[in-house]
Structure formats: structure tokens, C-alpha cells
Amino acid sequence: MAFMCATGKHRKPGRVKRTTAQAAGVAALTTTGVIGTLAASPALAAENPTEQTGLVPVLTMTEDVPEQIDAQAAAQQHAAEQKAAEEAAAKAAAKRAEEVRAAKARAAREAERKLLNTFVAPIAHSYVSTGYQASSSLWSSGSHTGIDFHAASGTAVHAVGSGTVVSTGWGGAYGNQIVIRMADGMYTQYGHLSSIGVTVGQKVVPGQQIALSGATGNVTGPHLHFEARTTPEYGSDVDPVAYLRKHGVDL
Ligand SMILES: [Zn+2]
């Protein structure tokens, strides 16, 4: 007969005791004649409104009715507790999902930041064969506007950092060339290429192969001509060695 909820509450004895005590209280009140003031007492009415109005039915109830009411109340409480537990579980799951999402976003930001700060040499395992501003009759300005990396024809040429390709194609004395706008707002230029592997508008990441070196344009032999610029145009060059070193490239 005991209805056990998950919480182990056993309500029936409490109710039986209460109704018995109440009946005894009413009987005592009746003998002293105070019953007439019971309903008029606002303190009692506020304290126990259901027992006040339910006085007669409680006394005439059969044994089964309170038991059914108790079982129903216990079932309702059980359902309410289950619902609360489900809501708490859903809340916890949502919180965990949000934490995972935030961690992923942090990792993506960190990866993006790392990519933006990573720079490499345009030709791996090479060296600078002709320095910046070296003098030669080969160059129309009379001074070298970039640096030359030693490279046999067909050597992989890499983007030195993250950026977007802004021009590709024939560049006169530069032969086949690529100009990339870097993530830091500067530009890098790659000349004398034998083949071009990117298109205008394409995003590149540090170390991505963009071309093969060659000997196109005004050259005496194959190599990669590399410039760092403040604009996409010829004449805005800065020291490319200083630029790469500033970004951690060991030259
Ligand atoms: Zn050069």
C-alpha cells in the first residue's frame, strides 16, 4: 500500500496523523463553544484554508479516498521531480555544448593568429645570391629593387606568409611574376618564374607553393627575384631581408 517515489518519500502516515489531530482539535473546540468563531478568524483561515473548508468531508471520508489522493499527489510530485531533473540535464548539456563551441572558436582564432604571424623563405634551403640595392647595369633603376635567391629552373616558390594574390602574369624585365598583398598590408613580389600556380584573388598561406622558378624576363640565369613593397607597384620596394627577418625568417 505504500507508494514509494524515487526520492523515497512515504506520505501516508503524515496525512493520517494530521487528519486525526485535526478532528480531535475540532472536537475540543466544539466543547468550549469556540467553533462559531473559527471561520471568522483570519489568522486561522490564512494558515490552513483547505482544512478549514474541507472539515466535514475529511471526517466522513472512507479509508480509500485519502490513500488515492496521496498516491496521485506522490505521482504528480514524482513527475514534477522528473521534469526538473530532465530540465537540469538539458541545461547542463547546453552548457557543455557552449563550452565546446567556445573552445573551438578559441582554437580557430589561435590558429588564424599563428598563420598570420608565420613567415618562411620563398625558396627552401637556398641563399641570397644578389643583395638588395646592389648596383648593376641589368636594372633600369641602376640598383637592385629586391633580392635574388639561388634556384635552378623548376624549383618550388612559396608564399612567404598569409595573403591574397593581387596580380599575376608578364611583368616585362621581371618576366612572369606574382604580386601578393600580405596580411600585414605589405606586398611581396616573385619574378622570373617559369610557371605560375595561382590566380588573382586567391588566398595563400605561409609556405604554400605558388609557382616554379625560372629565367623569364631580364636575367643572365635562373633564380628567384623577390621584393617586399609598400604598394603593389614597382618603385615602392623596401629591404626584403629586413622584412623577412622582422617576421622571424632566418636568412
Ligand atoms: Zn633580382
Image (tube, rainbow, N blue to C red):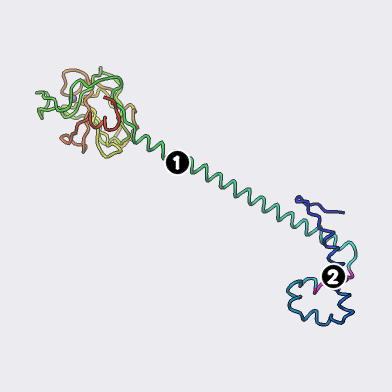
**Residue, disc 2:** 22
Q: CA distance from mark 1 to mark 2?
A: 64 Å
Q: Is residue 121 left or right of residue 18?
A: left
Secondary structure at badge 2 equals: helix
Q: Are marks 1 and 2 in contact (CB under 8 Å)?
A: no
Question: Can residue 54 be found in the magenta stretch?
Answer: yes
Residue 52 position in % (x across, y down)? 80, 74
Q: 95 or 197: which is nearer to us? A: 95
Seen from the viewer's position, the closer of residues 130 and 208 is: 130
Residue 44 colored magenta?
no
The three-letter amino acid code for the residue at tag 1 is: Arg
Q: Where's residue 114, x and y in %?
A: 38, 35
Mark nearer the N terminus (1 vs 2): 2
Q: Where does the image place residue 87, in percent across and percent down from the top left? A: 64, 52
Q: Position of residue 171 (x, y in %)?
A: 19, 30
Identify which residue is drawn at 34% across, 28% down. Answer: 207
Which residue in the protein does label 1 denote?
106
Q: Amino acid at mark 2?
A: Gln
- Left of 137 or right of it: where is 33? right
- Locate the C terminus by quadrant: top left
Say what secondary structure mark 1 lies in. helix
- Determine which quarter of the picture holds residue 142: top left
Judge whether 138 appears above or below 37 on screen: above
Instruction: Sort mark 2 into few (<14), some (14-19) or many (20+) by Cα contacts within 10 Å.
Output: some
Q: Is residue 123 visible?
A: yes
Q: Residues within 10 Å of mark 1 (few under 14, many from 20)?
A: few
Question: Residue at (78%, 59%) from the top-left corner?
Answer: 73
| Magenta segment | 52-60
Does the Cβ of the disc 2 residue fall within 8 Å of ligand 1?
no
